[in-house]
Image (cartoon, rainbow, N blue to C red):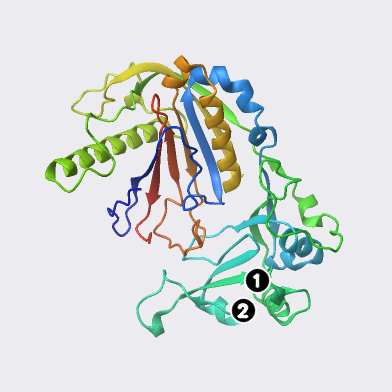
Amino acid sequence: MLRDARKTSGKEEATPQHLQPSGTPSPIDNDWLFNYNPQVDLILPTGIHDIISQSLLSCPSLVAPPSYHRLVMPLSTILEPSFFNTFIKSGNILLLSHGRLDVENSFCLSDGVLRMSLDTETYERAGLQGKPSKFGNGPGLMKRRRFLVELNLRSTSYLTGSKSFNRLKRACDTVFQKPQVFLFADLSPSNCAALDPPATPPSAVAAPATPEILNQFPARTITPQIDSFSDVLVPSFKAPPNSRPHGGGKSEEANYHREVWRDWAMEIYEYLSLLLLPSRPADRIKAADSVDTYLSTYAVDDAHTDSITRIRLSGLVPARWVNEFWGNLEGLLEGLPEDKAKMAWAGMVVHGFDDVPVGPTGKERGSLERCGSAYTMLKLPEEGAVMVWDLAGGQSE
């Protein structure tokens, strides 16, 4: 595990975090499993994609792709019996409001925990128990401008009619009454077959009918968008001789070899970033590129020309679906004929929403983390190891 301390205020930096040895399972670390992901990109050689495409499209994670709703409603809607009992007490959902972090009031809900990032005036009017935000505040008691409220709606304190429930309902009716845009995803097994069932057991009481709000805003199913790009320069993905990610002692030579490996890892990350520009790969990694070296000195070292296929999913993609999809892909790559398996590589980039009050582990986030919670994974050819890069913002802990 590598924890590179190159983080400065207001600056985002990708650092190589993990190298999974060959022959061992590589589940995604919980520190990167962010639930609120607007986009997932998978890239692999077109030749490999052509071999596994039918099996990949028929794997559980793509046979039942995630779906989501874009709702316009006041926050009080989640406390209506049909919604509260079905999706919060008994089920498991994701809910994320639209709003700029540390500037506007924002709300998110996952695993039954409702989190609110509120300005001081709204917090005082709501009358809910919270704590001063770590971000968006100045030093001293008189300069607290934002508060974070966390409410576990699955606890017995929030049974319908209880004091805590009524306090939250009053705040919703009097302070949060304005309708706003929410992204909603139902993670229950019946709605997303690739995901595990929720940890909370179903209620003994029969589930109410589907809330009317979901009928007003139909579900949007995430459909894979597949694009192929020819004549792309592809590196060998082989680390320089004698370089290593960690270990080797404290000698100058060992430090040098570790730095060489880190530089190589960052070059690979830069290449993947150029490969995944919004519309098409950058001209600098095209085989026909002939830019004047006075304008750009970028070059792909030890490269060959190949065709690349990109599979893109856009919407609200939950973390467990990402983990399941990567596991399906690894299984298909390992099942290739030996000559193909040695040359097979694949990368996946998961983009997180920027304006979510908390990170994957529940730690509070600030507005300087404009990178959201993005991470990149690359399954290397031949050795089969998996590299992971984590994007760290200036307020990352």
CA distance separating discs 1 and 2 = 8 Å
Q: Residues within 10 Å of mark 2 (few under 14, many from 20)?
A: many
Q: Secondary structure at mark 1?
A: loop
Residue pictured at 29% horizontal, 41% vertical: 245
Locate residue 120, reporting x and y percent.
51, 78
Locate residue 353, reporting x and y percent.
51, 51
Is 280 placed above or below 100 here?
above
The one of 337 and 42 positioned closer to us in this rendering? 337
- Residue flagged by tag 1: what amino acid is it? Phe
- Which residue bears the numbered disc 2? 126
Locate residue 46, reporting x and y percent.
49, 19
Is 145 placed above or below 309 here?
below
Is 42 placed above or below 13 here?
above
The first of marks 1 and 2 along the sequence is: 2
The one of 213 and 186 positioned closer to us in this rendering? 186
* Residue 317 visible in image: no
- Residue flagged by tag 2: what amino acid is it? Ala
Residue pictured at 68% horizontal, 63% vertical: 179
Dots 1, 2 in contact, CB < 8 A: yes
Locate residue 105, reporting x and y percent.
55, 67
Quarter of the image with the C terminus is: bottom left
Is 227 placed above or below 151 here?
above
Per the rendering, the mark at residue 176 is 1
Per the rendering, the mark at residue 378 is none
Q: Quadrant of residue 79?
A: bottom right
Q: Secondary structure at mark 2?
A: helix
Residue lying farthest to the left in this orientation: 252
Residue pictured at 61% horizontal, 82% vertical: 127
